[in-house]
Image (cartoon, grey):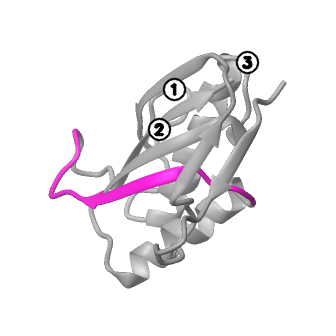
Amino acid sequence: MSVAKQALLPSGLAKPAGVWSTVVKAKPGTMVFIAGLVATDAAGKLVGEGDIAAQTRQVCENLRTAVRAAGGELSDIMQVNVFARDVKPGAFAQIHAVRREFFPTDPPASTMVEVTRLVDERYLIEINAVAVI
């Protein structure tokens, strides 16, 4: 059962340029904290080496698996923090094209930062999340 979630765009703030909500309001529920996930399959093998879209897709699949393990769905994710090796316009657009597939309406609040390296130099993106179920 999904918790009630409402995406808000406060007056005086610009509309997001990508797939995120500026403010997300959730009704009471159980908070679930999902650690940073990278583009590995269930066996721990990297998926999509060198391909930001493929890695983003695998990370989003991993987010879905994680939130379902806690009894929720992607729509229950209220906030994500995205750590990407490249956030230039081309990479940014690819990341958000994939995110739009997984969060088609009322996307979570989001912060994205460019980092010089993740735990494994082959990883291009890592995302952690907070859900309310």
Q: What residue is at 42 percent from the left and 83 percent from the top?
A: 90
Q: Does residue 57 sit above or below 43 in this rendering?
A: below
Q: Secondary structure at mark 1?
A: loop
> Residue at position x 17%, y 52% from top?
117
Dots 1, 3 in contact, CB < 8 A: no
User: As shown in the figure, which amino acid type bears the numbered disc 1?
Assistant: Ala
Q: Magenta span: helix, strand or loop, mainly?
A: loop
**For the residues marked 3 and 2, what is the alpha-carbon distance in whole angstroms?**
22 Å
Earlier sequence position, callout 3 versus callout 2: 2
Q: Residue at x 22, y 39 (%)?
A: 119
Mark 1–mark 3 distance (CA, rounded to whole Å): 22 Å
Q: Amino acid at mark 3?
A: Gly
Query: Which quadrant holds residue 21?
Result: bottom right
Of the pair 5 and 67, the residue shown nearer to us: 5
Q: Is residue 114 magenta?
A: yes
- For image coordinates 55% across by 21% down, the residue present is 32
Circle number at residue 71: 3
Asked if disc 2 and disc 1 are in contact, CB closer than 8 Å, the reply is yes
First in sequence: mark 1 vs mark 3: 1
Nearer the observer, 53 or 45 = 53
